[in-house]
Image: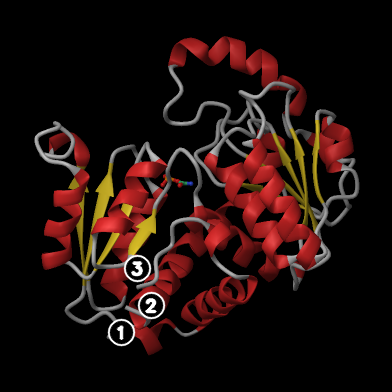
């Protein structure tokens, strides 16, 4: 049984295989119109979503299957009346595949342990692999390759997107520089960084952390940022976080340090004026809505890939 829990578990060959499949699904969607006939995806959400929810549901429908939205807040699991063990065992008797967006990565791992259907990580506190697979597809579309390119990530680096970027880039041989404020509450998990450096030693990717935004971006082919206010962060922390992250805002001045042909990415949702300016987000280097579209093609590819091996 194959799952998508974190890109740390996937080989570079498997990542590239799914990227190729996503490209084919984008190019020739009609070839896959019946691939999921009578298949059912259950989507468990403990946090909000626009892209993940709608792209998975649309993707399953486009391939002839059905998707069920299961809201944790109105479930026995959410109210503490039922545990994860029993929940995933029940779902395994009804559905063919599960995608879950959960606060706790350990809960997702418990689903994998006790379920008997493929489990897809739709975002946890640790990683967001679906997002980064779609991002790698987007980079390859725009740049023609991945190996040897340099991606600069700016801003809040103690988050799932940074962790998955570290794993994903290092596995495919893309250099990654993380530019973030000093302090463990803003920096990647040290173990993730160490793992990515080990993967990079094999693939030839350089994996580096810096607190200097301009140094992170210098000569980069891809400039990437993410929300300063991830879903779990209380609004009361807004002002303090804006002060801390302001030097890492992606604006025209910072973009000028990157390669002239660099692309700008943000997995969204985004707030113009915070992690990037409107000028960058809506400017000619921005590919944010290509990233959005590729979530659809990539999620279809992930489901086909996992169910082919179930
Ligand atoms: N980027 C992302 O996962 O978007 P949603 O939170 O809208 O699913």
Q: Is residue 178 above or below residue 66?
A: above
Identify the secondary structure beneath mark 3: helix
Tag 1 and tag 2, C-beta contact below 8 Å: yes
Q: Is residue 250 above or below residue 1?
A: above
Give the CA separation, mark 3 to mark 2: 10 Å
Which label sits in the foreground, 1 or 2? 2
Q: Which residue in the structure is indicated by mark 3? A: 59
Task: Please report the residue visible at 47 percent of the width from the left and 79 percent of the height from the top.
Answer: 25
Instruction: Report the coloring of the rendering.
Output: secondary structure
Identify the secondary structure beneath mark 1: loop
Q: Earlier in the sequence, mark 1 or mark 2?
A: 1
Give the CA separation, mark 3 to mark 1: 11 Å
Which label sits in the foreground, 3 or 1? 1
Task: Please report the residue visible at 67 percent of the width from the left and 70 percent of the height from the top.
Answer: 141
Q: Earlier in the sequence, mark 3 or mark 1?
A: 1
Q: Residues within 10 Å of mark 1 (few under 14, many from 20)?
A: some
Q: Nearer the viewer, residue 38 or 293?
A: 38
Task: Please report the residue visible at 60 percent of the width from the left and 10 percent of the height from the top.
Answer: 240
Q: Nearer the viewer, residue 28 or 299?
A: 299
Residue 285 visible here: no
Identify the secondary structure beneath mark 2: helix
Measured from the top left, where is residue 218 in percent x and y? Answer: 90, 43
Q: Which quadrant of the view contains residue 310?
A: bottom left
Q: Which quadrant of the view contains residue 46?
A: top left
In the displayed structure image, the side of residue 200 where residue 50 appears, left or right: left
Indicate yes or no: mark 3 CB to ligand 1 under 8 Å.
Answer: no
Q: Which residue in the structure is indicated by mark 1? A: 35
Measured from the top left, where is residue 285 in percent x and y? Answer: 74, 51
Q: Which residue in the structure is indicated by mark 2? A: 304
């Amino acid at each position: 049984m194959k799952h998508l829990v974190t890109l740390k578990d996937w080989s570079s060959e498997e990542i590239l295989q799914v990227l190729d499949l996503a490209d084919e699904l984008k190019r020739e969607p009609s070839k896959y119109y019946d691939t999921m006939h009578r298949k059912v995806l259950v989507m468990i959400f403990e946090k909000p979503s626009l892209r993940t929810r709608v792209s998975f549901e649309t993707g399953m429908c486009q391939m002839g299957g059905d998707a069920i939205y299961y809201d944790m807040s109105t479930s026995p699991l959410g109210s503490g009346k039922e545990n994860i063990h029993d929940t995933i065992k029940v779902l395994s008797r009804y559905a063919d595949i599960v995608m879950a967006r959960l606060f706790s990565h350990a809960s997702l791992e418990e689903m994998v342990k006790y379920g008997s259907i493929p489990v897809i990580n739709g975002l946890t506190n640790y990683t967001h692999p679906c997002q980064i697979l779609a991002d790698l597809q987007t980079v390859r579309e725009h740049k023609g390759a991945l190996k040897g390119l340099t991606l600069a990530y700016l801003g809040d680096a103690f988050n799932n997107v940074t962790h998955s970027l570290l794993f994903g880039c290092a596995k495919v041989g893309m250099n990654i520089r993380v530019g973030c404020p000093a302090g463990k509450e803003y920096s990647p998990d040290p173990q993730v960084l160490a793992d990515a450096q080990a993967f990079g030693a094999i693939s030839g990717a350089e994996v580096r952390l810096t607190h200097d935004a301009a140094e992170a971006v210098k000569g980069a082919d891809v400039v990437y940022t993410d929300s300063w206010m991830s879903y779990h962060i209380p609004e009361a922390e807004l002002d303090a976080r804006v002060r801390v992250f302001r030097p890492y805002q992606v604006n025209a001045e910072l973009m000028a340090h990157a390669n002239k042909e660099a692309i700008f990415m943000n997995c969204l949702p985004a707030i113009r004026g915070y992690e990037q300016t409107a000028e960058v987000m809506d400017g000619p280097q921005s590919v944010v809505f290509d990233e959005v579209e590729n979530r659809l093609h990539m999620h279809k590819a992930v489901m086909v890939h996992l169910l082919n091996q179930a």
